[in-house]
Amino acid sequence: MKKYVIIGDSTCDLPKDIREKYGIEYAQMNFVADGIEHRSSLDWEEYSPKEYYDLMRNGVLVKTTQVPREEFVSVFSHWAKQGYDILYIACSSGLSGSVGLATVVAAELKEEYPDINIICVDSLISSIGQGMLLVKAAMLRAEGKSIEETAAWIEENKLKVNQCGTVDSLEYLRRAGRVTATSAFFGNIFGVKPLIISDIKGHNYAYRKVKGASNARKEVAKDTVAAAEDIENNVVCISHADCLQEAEKLRDEILSLAKFKDVYITYIGPVVGASVGPGTLITYVYGKKVIIEGKE
């Protein structure tokens, strides 16, 4: 079998130990804070998670970019020169233009490296949901699956990664243009929390609202369990925007409803974090195929 590398991007939110364990690389996006552009490292090299989210809490406007063209050229060329085929599992096209740009760069590099196969897959999700697909791809590679077989599996099963979460405020998502059905939530009384899924087109969709953080957490737990299959062998992943105690409460809520094999908790990285804002909680679990399409 020809060797191939598996690449994500800065929205996959996989910490270094997981990336190293499974041999996963990533292409970096950028973020801009106070007019200064920074690399969106998943290893928090410039800011700690608390420092980063405190910027937003203190009113600093943080904007993000897709993966720059020169980053794709650099990363893809690095592996192509070594004779590796490349499987890029990208952030949802509903949230980022990175997969489209990567496809263009891959076609251009094909002229320079005609023997290299570069496959770009739209994950239709982000954060640890995207990360879960990268890890699964790495597991399939370890089992001896070819790049074509692995890419086909991801395409076939990507909508089985279910997202459910809640944010402290929809303002970040609204400002970033990253959520549908926002209008129904604005003008409501203080304390109303939106419940947000990733729909079949990879958009964040605010599909329901509840009163209060505690009720939102309970509903996220219920919806996560309802979406899951093969629970005793399944793992729930929780990503959070600097609210570890709330993430731990959510974990406990989930485990009180169903005995999953494990619950994994990690930080939402800087790119996704800029769009969702501090205090966000999101669960991801393999299960039923997503069939909902969000509507304004």
Image (tube, grey):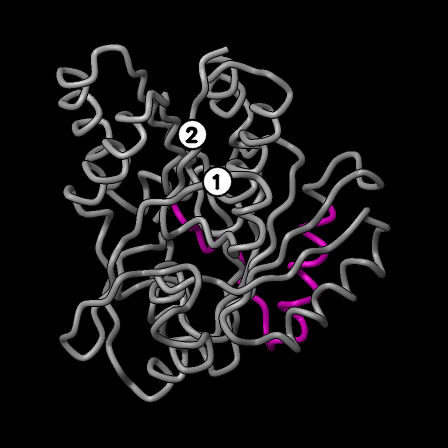
Q: Which mark is residue 219?
A: none
Residue 74 relative to residue 137: left or right: left
- The answer to whether mark 1 and mark 2 are in CB contact below 8 A is no
N-terminal label among 1 and 2:
2
Query: Could you say where residue 236 lies in the image, as x and y percent from the top left?
Result: 69, 50
Query: Could you say where residue 19 lies in the image, as x and y percent from the top left?
Result: 52, 47
Observer-nearest of 59 and 192: 59
Tally the numbered discs.
2
Vertical relation: 160 (above or below) 251: above
Label 1: which secondary element: strand
Observer-nearest of 105 and 16: 16
Q: Residue at x 42, y 42 (%)?
A: 25
Residue 223 relative to residue 51: left or right: right
Query: Could you say where residue 97 lies in the image, as x and y percent from the top left?
Result: 23, 41
Few, some or many residues within 10 Å of mark 2 (<14, 14–19, 20+)? many
Vertical relation: 79 (above or below) 251: above
User: Is residue 187 located in the magenta-colored stretch of the structure?
Assistant: no
Vertical relation: 217 (above or below) 22: below
User: Spatial distance from mark 1 to mark 2, Cα to Cα?
Assistant: 7 Å
Label 1 sits on residue: 24
Mark 2: amino acid: Val
**The furthest residue to the bottom:** 58
Label 2 sits on residue: 5
Label 2: which secondary element: strand
Vertical relation: 98 (above or below) 60: above
Q: Residue at x 26, y 72 (%)?
A: 62
Mark 1: amino acid: Ile
Few, some or many residues within 10 Å of mark 1 (<14, 14–19, 20+)? some
Query: Could you say where residue 177 lies in the image, as x and y percent from the top left?
Result: 27, 57
Magenta span of residues: 203-225
